[in-house]
Image (cartoon, rainbow, N blue to C red):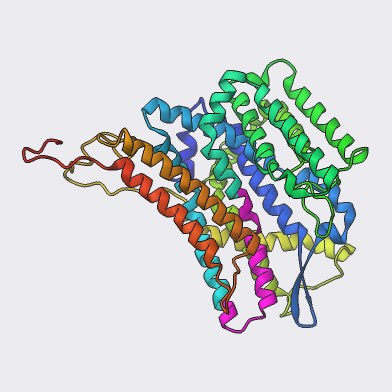
Amino acid sequence: MRIRELAAATPARRDRCVDFLRAFAIVMVVIGHWLAVVITFQDGRLDGEHMLAVQPWTRWLTWVFQVMGIFFLVGGYANAASWTSARGRGDGYAAWMGSRAQRLLRPTTVFIVIGVAASAIARLAGADPGLVRLAAWVVAISLWFLAVYLVVVAVTPAMLAAHRRWGLAVPAVLTAAAAGFDVLRLSTGDAGLAAANYLLVWLTLPQLGFAWRDGTLTRSARPWLLFLGGSAALVVLTTIGPYPVSMVGVPGAELQNTSPPTIALLSLAVAQTGLALLLAEPLRAWLRRERVWMTVIAVNAGIMTLFLWHMVPVLVAALALYPTGIMPRPEVGSASWFAWRPVWVAICALLLAGFVTVFVRFERPRRKRATGTRTATSAAPRSAGRMAPGAGGTAGRLAVALTLVGTAASSVGIIRLTIGGFQGAGPAGIPLAALLIYLAGLFAFWAAGRVRTSRPAPDAAGRDA
């Protein structure tokens, strides 16, 4: 279906602001990465620097570009709607989670396979191993988000049930727990002691998304309280408090707000949530314009592909433009360098559009071919979407267990690939252990689907035994 047809078919009840914020968050992350990662070319060799380390004053800009909290916010809203809809259809957890995971992992798998293969080929072809490691790390660095988000999706039913019982007390408790781990981290200097904040902080925002969806968060002056309270906490924590100004990791910095996430980063996300709610009504009016809404739909249609591939254009552009001298290389941070940044972003955007055009097909659900006759499987309504007859009891529990194993293994594999940057031991640098863990996760999801949709064999009379 074309974008214009999708726009015309949008139900009146759909909150377009949610779709806009999802697209806006990803676009801001992409542009932020293009501006922050600086590829240099000196003495015939490509290298990399980080803008936040070279120009410390730019760290304040991360308060604008660090918007992953918004993505988790709208993720909570969308996951709650999806799970509620699935339960209304009679779908079980394994079916629902399998469908959500497939949408995330299908394009991710293509990206990982190509990334690992390209890195291995470059190493075997004699490319500088240091350069290959840098390139592979730059391309893979954003994968951490998918590992965390996959877990957030997996726990949605439990967290949504907690929200329905305790409301805003849930994000309050999560925030208090995150603050406690921060105190432990700051008092000992061991960031590993606050590792739980990778979940505690990023689980808080989906809870606010649940509250947004059911109207709890938009009552009275709560959007203002979120915006002003989050902003005040952010300022205090980064001025009087011990937290750095940058909401993005700075190479070499002793304390980072992102690894693990801190309550300073959570304060920024809460303030952004309040601002988003305050702007929601004028945004909805603006989004009723056909061209604006079509643009939002177009971005969301390939949002995973856009996110996965957005750092590849940085490497392609640098390899094509710097060694050849086509693009000038002024001193990083100079007036001339900043003047060329819009050109750099435009080139990266053009290249990314090409990658999205090629790979977006792996993100979109496969269309099933229509057949002239109905098979025994197709005759069962929604057999692929819910627990089929004979798949309850032990089989149903097995499907759920396999789904949880798939979630855990896929997330661990992605994290290992993020840390290693598609690189491992051996001449080709293939990260075999990380790949095997990730593939085990994919297999577990596949096995859960087989268990979930299995049906008893028909008897001789053509009826289910």
Decide whether the magenta segment is chiefly helix, strand or loop: helix
**In this rendering, would 221 be left or right of 93?**
right
Question: From the viewer's perspective, is residue 452 above or below residue 109?
Answer: above
Q: Can residue 275 be seen in the rendering of this structure?
A: no
> Is residue 443 positioned above or below 44 on the image?
above
Q: Quadrant of residue 152?
A: top right
Which residue in the rendered view is the most extreme toward the top? Answer: 220
- The residue located at (21%, 47%) in the rendering is 371
Q: Quadrant of the N terminus?
A: top left
Q: Residue at x 32, y 39 (%)?
A: 395
Q: Which residues are magenta?
A: 122-145
Above or below — where is 201 with respect to 216?
below
Left or right: where 225 falls relative to 209 = right
Q: Residue at x 77, y 32 (%)?
A: 271
Give the x, y percent position of residue 326.
Answer: 73, 76
Instruction: State the residue in front, 43 or 129.
Output: 129
Q: Residue furthest bottom?
A: 126
Which of the 4 image quarters holds residue 200?
top right
